[in-house]
Image (cartoon, grey):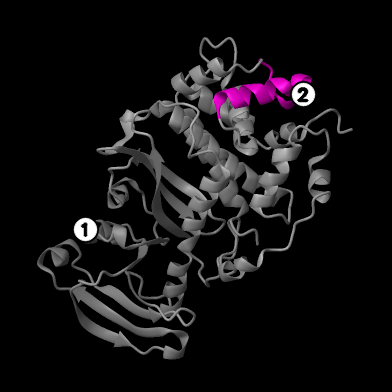
Amino acid sequence: MHEGRTVFAQVMEWLPKYELSKCVARYRGDFHVRGMSCYEQFLIMGFAQLTYRESLRDIETCLRALGSKLYHSGIRSWPARSALADANETRDWRMFADFAQVLIGQATELYGNEDIGVHLREAAYALDSTAIDLCLSLFPWAKFRRTKAAIKLHTLLALRGNFPTVIILTSGKVHDVNILDDLIFDAGSFYVMDRGYLDFARLHRIEEDHAFFVTRAKKNFRFRRRHSRPVAKRSGVRFDQTVVLTGFYSHQQYPDTLRRIGYRDPLTGKSFVFLTNNFRVPALTIAKLYKCRWQIELFFKWIKQHLRIKAFYGTSENAVRVQIWIAISVYVLIAIIRKRLRLPHSPYAIVQILSVTLFEKTPILQVFAQHPPLPEPPDMHNQQYLPGFLTGQ
């Protein structure tokens, strides 16, 4: 017996509780609270994420069935769905957003030396968004179209470790490119994005901040070539050019030179044309770096499949934001535990094992030792170039 401590308590032990209390105090989350504290709210919502609970009634029923095990897991108050609903509706979501940033900072340090499959010393980030569809009659504040509601999860993902460093929640109407106005770009870092972010005025701000961008050119891209560099076409690189924009408005928005790189994927035969403001990194490295952008698609797919962010326990904007930020915190916490305990399991396997063993009183390392990792399915071979947390390598 592990001193009567459940696996759930051992998992939540990795939470920096002092940092959470500071975030709660910043927004007076526990002010005049007699029952469920913000910490217990986080634990209950974390339990719901790890065990795939469908509703508030589902959460209440399952937790009540555990009896005395709740106390040994850190949940002191008797869980009532009305209390949890009120907490999600009224308590400021920003304290959980701030706490998620604390966990992201810890994970970034742990995964800072991860190999991304590209010879690159500088930090690299992928920027993209995903839409979460909602029912318009239940979520009228998130109106997207005449008969549809949606919110967007704009994410800046660190490619070393596959962690979101910036997450911005907006309505579905907000265009992706507008998020570039809200970001602070680190000098010397690479920002990889698709053609949806091709706005030369905003890209020039990245240049002025001494950071680098990598994106794809559109078919109607107007330019004049100034110089061509020799390339090794066997590598897939077709051309490497220095160009200047010739469109009247585009040249005003971006008066400096750009680098235009053509690449044909040897495996698929598809051709790509990349634009970047970096002239030092080899052309093939730029192509491989853009290929790593697929990690953010895997991130969106993973959290939608394995975290509760598509079915919500409340209908207000505050409740939705609380649930999403706690879901992100659970995602990052799993990554922290995996790294610190040096678990060979994939994130999917960790979540599955925890979902059926959370309230066993067994040392957590013994739990994972009893469930050795299974071999990768055959369809994963096409994604082996994506190292890090998502692929479990």
Residue at image location 30% in from the left, 58% down from the top: 197
Q: CA distance from mark 2 to mark 1?
A: 57 Å
Residue at image location 57% in from the left, 32% down from the top: 54
Residue 76, numbered circle: none
Sequence-earlier tag: 2 or 1: 2
Residue 69, numbered circle: 2
Residue at image location 31% in from the left, 39% down from the top: 148
Q: Quadrant of residue 226 in the image?
A: bottom left
Q: Is disc 1 placed on a helix, strand or loop?
A: helix
Q: Is disc 2 placed on a helix, strand or loop?
A: helix
- Which x, y percent locates residue 201? 21, 58
Query: Dominant secondary structure of the magenta stretch?
Result: helix
- Which x, y percent locates residue 153? 41, 44
Residue at image location 24% in from the left, 77% down from the top: 243
Residue 201, numbered circle: 1
- When the figure is inspected, residue 203 is found, relative to residue 328, above or below; the finding is below
Q: Is residue 112 or residue 13 the one in the foreground?
A: 13
Q: Does any portion of residue 5 appear in the rendered image?
A: yes
Q: Is residue 51 or residue 95 the one in the foreground?
A: 51
| Amino acid type shown at disc 2 | Lys
Tell me where the magenta segment starts and ends, as one range: 55-77
| Amino acid type shown at disc 1 | Ala
Name the outermost residue toward the right: 1
Near mark 1 (Cα within 10 A), the count class, few <14, some 14-19 or many ≥20, is some
Say whether residue 193 is left or right of residue 40. left
Which quadrant would the C terminus be assigned to in this image? bottom right
